[in-house]
Each structure stands twice: as C-alpha cells, then as structure tokens.
Image (spheres, helix red, strand yellow):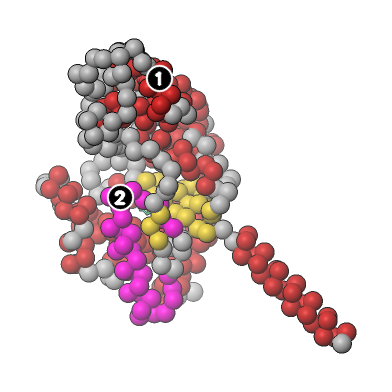
Amino acid sequence: MLLYQLEKRIVAAKAAESVNEMDEKKKVMLSGIKPSGDLTLGSYLGAIKNWAERAETFDCYYFMADLHALTTRQNPADLRRRTLEQLAQYVACGLDPEKNTLFIQSHVPEHAQLGWVLQCYTMFGELSRMTQFKDKSAKNADNINGGLFAYPSLMAADILLYQPDYVPVGDDQKQHVELTRDIAHRFNGVYGDVFKIPEPYIPKVGARIMDLLDPASKMSKSDDIGNGRICLMDQPQDIMRKFKRAVTDSDTGDHCVRYDRENKPGVANLMQIYASCTGRSFDAIEAEFTGHGYGDFKAAVGEAVVETLRPIREEAARLMKDKGYLENLCRTGAEKASYIAMKTLRKVYKKVGLVPKA
Ligand code: TRP
C-alpha cells in the first residue's frame, strides 16, 4: 500500500516536472531584415514597435540579412553603415539584446554553408516561379545574377538553421516561407526528421503605413531619397517638411479630417500615423480637428512623429558612436546564434554524407 502511494507520488512529480519544462520552453521565432534601405516610420509602427514585448512569449532571433543585400549592387560603405545602423535602431526601438538574439547574418557562416546544401535541394522550376525573383529581374534587367535566383535557398537556410516554430514576415515574403517548408519536407523525406517545419506568422497588431505622396503603396525602405518616406534617422525639420507636402484631397469642410480609407486614402493614412503615435482613436482625432483644415492637421501629425522618433534617433545615434558596444553586441549575438546553427549544420553535413572534419 505504502509503496503504491509512493509510486503514485513519483509519477505525479515527474508529470509536473515535464509540464514545467514545457512551460519554460518558449516557441522559437526568427526573422531577417535586409539592410538594403533605411528603416522607416512604416517599419517602426508596422512591426518593430511590437517586437519588444514579444521576447516575453517567444525565444526571438532577429538578424541583419547582409548576404541577401548583395543580390543587388550595393555601395560597400553604405551597406556597412546601414547594417550597423539597423542593429543600433533595433536596440533603440526597445529590443533588448539580453532577451533577444540579434546578429549579423555574415557573422554566422553556417548560413552560407547550409544555403549551398539547400540549393541542391531546391528545384530550378521552384526558383523560377518566385514572384520576387520575377519582379526583381524585371527591375534589375542588367544584373540578374545567380544569387538573386538562389535567394530563397539562402533564406530557407537562415530559417531552418534555428528550427523555429514561427517566421514573422510580410505578405511579400510568404511565398519564400512556403518554399522553405517544401524544401524542409523534401529533405526530411530523404534523411529523416532533420528540420522542424516552420509556420509563417502574421502578427495581429501593427499598422500598415502608406507612402505620404502615394497612399496607394506601402511606405517602403529603399535607396532613393523619397519625400513620401520618413526614415527613423530623419531630422525634425525634414519630417515636418515631408508631412507638409503629404497628399490629402480637395475636401475643405469642417469635417475634412475623417477616416475613410476608400475615398480619402491620404487622410486615412495620416490619421493612422497620428493614432499610432499618440494612442488616440479615430473618433477622438476627428473631434480634435473639427473645424481645422489640412494645414493644421498635417503639422500636428508631423509633430507627433517628430516626438515619437526623437528618442529612437538620439539613442541610435549614440549607439552608433559607441563602436565598442556595437562590436560586443555583434559578437555575443553571433556566438549565441552560432551555437544553434552549428548543431543543425553538423547534422545536415552528416546526413548528406560529407566526411566530418577531424
Ligand atoms: N527576404 C527577406 C526580405 O527581403 C529578408 C530575409 C532573409 C528573411 N532571410 C530571412 C526574412 C529569413 C525572414 C526569415 O525582407
């Protein structure tokens, strides 16, 4: 009788322990951002702003996809600056490097190494069907290089190295995550369960911010100096100038500031920006600007953005000057990432039949 009770207690304790372990094991999330353009207000309000609190629920990896940036021609000095600046901006936006793994892709050579192997498990037809490849080849007709074509295999490697549960991506990258899943399935089909099959993760929160001069298209990070685009490092006077020029419509009444995405896309976008920066509702904003014209409204939105970005810009600029801090950040991030990446790569090399290094 006594023995039976003891056994029962042991079984219960073991069960509790494994539940605890499961609780503690956070789901893994990974995302990469190509440093081919400066981060914008759209990147911040639409995504980065919500990343900080994610670290409580997920084990997060964010990396600067500098190898991916090479698929289009880059000015070397600009690429270097942007890569570091992006890292500094993430930290300035509230991503805690102690709670997240932040690193530069090229500092973890396993990306390129697994990328090669996975190219051998990606079909020519699959790569040819990628919409991003088709778009980019049309835009860069004089530089349709092998890297641009094989980009999705490298992206699959970025992801699969860390065995993540989720990959948060925008719509434009969903096709790449689908292909990653296909590659992982194909590989696992031949060699057993090597890769976890990741899910694309579409965040629930996050505003979609449009271009100030062309509210039909997304505010995108790109190389050219766009007046429809606010960059995180823009100076206050430039922000104010860009908002002054923002497209609205020819409405003049007392209620011209009202939310109507369909018919008043420019105003709706400005309201969205103002709402995201101040936390006010659309109703409250409409009430605030009843009887005011677009001039007042645009100036108010500009000021709200200036104040939202000021601490980020100042902190990022401070970090950019602190080379020691940045180097240390890069090193520890890459070390943490390598630890996981090496394990996966070693397993893959072994499975496909490469001779282990003595
Ligand atoms: N392709 C992504 C972009 O253009 C960047 C990227 C590279 C990425 N590797 C990734 C995103 C892995 C998510 C996961 O923005």
Q: For numbered disc 1, what is the local secondary structure?
A: helix
Q: Does the magenta stretch include residue 173?
A: yes
Image quarter where the N terminus lies is bottom right
- Discs 2, 1 touching: Cβ within 8 Å: no
Q: Which of 43 and 133 is in front in this view?
A: 43
Q: Nearer the viewer, mark 2 or mark 1?
A: 1
Q: Nearer the viewer, residue 16 or 193?
A: 16
Residue 85 pos. (x, y %): 41, 35
Residue in view at x 22 percent, y 30 percent: 263
Residue 92 pos. (x, y %): 50, 33
Confirm or reject: label 2 Cβ below 8 Å from ligand 1: no
Q: For numbered disc 2, what is the local secondary structure?
A: helix
Q: How many labels does the image show?
A: 2
Q: Residues within 10 Å of mark 1 (few under 14, many from 20)?
A: some
Examine the image and state in which quarter residue 152 appears. bottom left
Q: Earlier in the sequence, mark 2 or mark 1?
A: 2
Can residue 105 be seen by looking at this rendering?
no
Highlighted range, magenta: 166-195
User: As displayed, is residue 165 above or below residue 88?
Assistant: below
User: As displayed, is residue 59 above or below residue 84?
Assistant: below
Q: Is residue 248 left or right of residue 335?
A: left
Residue in view at x 31 percent, y 18 percent: 255
Determine which residue is flagged by label 2: 171
Determine which residue is flagged by label 1: 287
Q: Is residue 258 left or right of residue 19?
A: left
Q: Does the magenta stretch include residue 132?
A: no
Question: Three-letter amino acid code at disc 2?
Answer: Asp
Question: Three-letter amino acid code at disc 1?
Answer: Ala
Q: In this view, does 358 lie to the left or right of 35?
A: right
